[in-house]
Image (cartoon, rainbow, N blue to C red):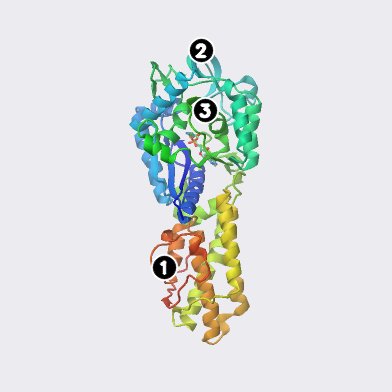
Amino acid sequence: MAVANFSLTTPIYYVNAKPHLGHAYTTIIGDALARWHRLIGDDVHFLTGTDEHGLKIQQAADAAGMTPQQFADGIAPQFQQAWKKLNISNDDFIRTTEPRHYAGVAKLLQACYDAGDIELDTYTGLYCVACELYYTEEELVDGLCPIHKLPVESFEEENYFFRLSRFEGRLLDWYAGHPGAMTPEFRGNEALGLIRGGLRDFSVSRTSLAWGVPLPWDTKHVAYVWFDALTNYLSSVGYGTDDERFSEWWPVDYHLLGKDIVRQHCVYWPAMLMSAGIALPKGWGIGGWLLAGGEKMSKTSGNVIDPLDLVDDIGVDGFRYYVLAETPYGQDGDFTYEGLLNRYNSDLANNLGNLLSRVATVVAKKCDGIGPAPRADSPLATAAATAYESTSDGWLSLQPSRALDATWSLIRATNAYLEANEPWKTEPGAAVDAVMGDALEALRIVAVLASPAIPDTAQEVWGRIGLPGLVVGQRLPNAAAWGGYPGALAVTKGEPMFPRRQIPA
Ligand code: ME8
């Protein structure tokens, strides 16, 4: 199979405070998708990073009595460590304070300026510092920012403006020519609604703030934080520093983002790229919010849950599985601890953990601990083929919860197969060997298909059923073809993988 490039990005997170569950949510989805694409043989570039300029960071640094650079230097590694702990396989981590990023921002600003789409003007407006966005009076809710429910500040500045208003027709035409570029569709329609509602020019520079990238033609101004931040997607792959690398990795296949930053990603960003004559992204995945008690979890609202606490409690894979399986992509989900435990008990303890432990126990008792080979005409072969097809569809259409449900359908079918055949009640011999060989082969395929979501567990299953090497070294579709388990391998019982958890009263 030819190697294809597949690139995807998460938002780069503000360093005004440490990583929280909402950041982990988007990053885990990106990670699983990156891992699926590596399994199908793509050459993957998965990018995440931190957004370190702007008024919000300046204010946080002031409050901490530090320079913004010192402040960012303290928080950025916390994101890197959190992603390491969550087994995030990012290929790059960009910080907007890096020289390569400054080069990219300067180049993009200059390209839009040279195209005549950036012009000097005076602006008076209502600014939400938490959003780093201007609002009109009508957009406020009870006089407050509609997202953060915080008071806005009245600003008047001489700014350079990006003439977004010129791009309304071009953006609508482009999206009409690229149906399905934004996923899920209902979120894409919200973005189209923003464009149809009329576009206002936005300011792309600040003089009231020194913390940012200077405009190349007027260094009294620094770039507006969103112009700066969006450009990370280009600067990370060589825009402004390495043309060859840039042509290899741009345009990106998917920008993953939350519904709170659709305007910037699906309206501002493509217009900036059009202005500079740069190809548009191939896709956007727009996720919903993970709510805590019905409110968006955010640093600004103060209702944050630390993902690392949950990992200590339920394990990395327990947490990753919950994030991916619980809520259909694009919808809002309400995080509850009880929901996390329920998901863990039903899918990981009762289904996967139970299947593995049954298989290992029966192989120990009835097959001398040596896993038999599967039958070519096993009744489970069809379930495995269907599970693979639907798992693949789920990942490729950016629906992790559907992909996992499809993978789990093979676990459920295998448990049902064991219950129907009751090998634990049968005398050792050909009949037991046949059933156990089939179950081991199903577990092998499950390990491969589940590996993007729960990589450590998948590797553990792989090893316990006696297979050598790494699950991440497998390649689909071959690795899902029925009959790959060779038999005559030592099967290890091991500790229970996902012990059941009590739901607190
Ligand atoms: O907006 N539920 O950074 P940010 C789900 N720096 N996802 C959530 C979430 C929640 N409760 N809270 C945050 C920024 N997220 C800019 C981005 S990109 C060029 C610049 C996720 O730290 C979600 O993906 O506020 C959201 O879009 C992102 O974190 C915002 O993170």
Q: Amino acid at mark 2?
A: Asp
Q: Which residue is mark 2?
A: 121
Dividing the picture into quarters, in which one does residue 260 lie? top right
Q: Amino acid at mark 3?
A: Met
For the residues marked 2 and 1, what is the alpha-carbon distance in whole angstroms? 64 Å
Q: Which residue is mark 1?
A: 463
Q: Is residue 30 above or below residue 169?
A: below
Choose the circle earlier in sequence order: 3 or 2: 2
Residue 118 percent coordinates (x, y)? 49, 18
Q: Secondary structure at mark 2?
A: strand
Q: Secondary structure at mark 1?
A: helix
Q: Secondary structure at mark 3?
A: helix
Q: Amino acid at mark 1?
A: Gly
Residue 467 percent coordinates (x, y)? 42, 69
Residue 51 percent coordinates (x, y)? 43, 33
Q: Which residue is mark 3?
A: 274
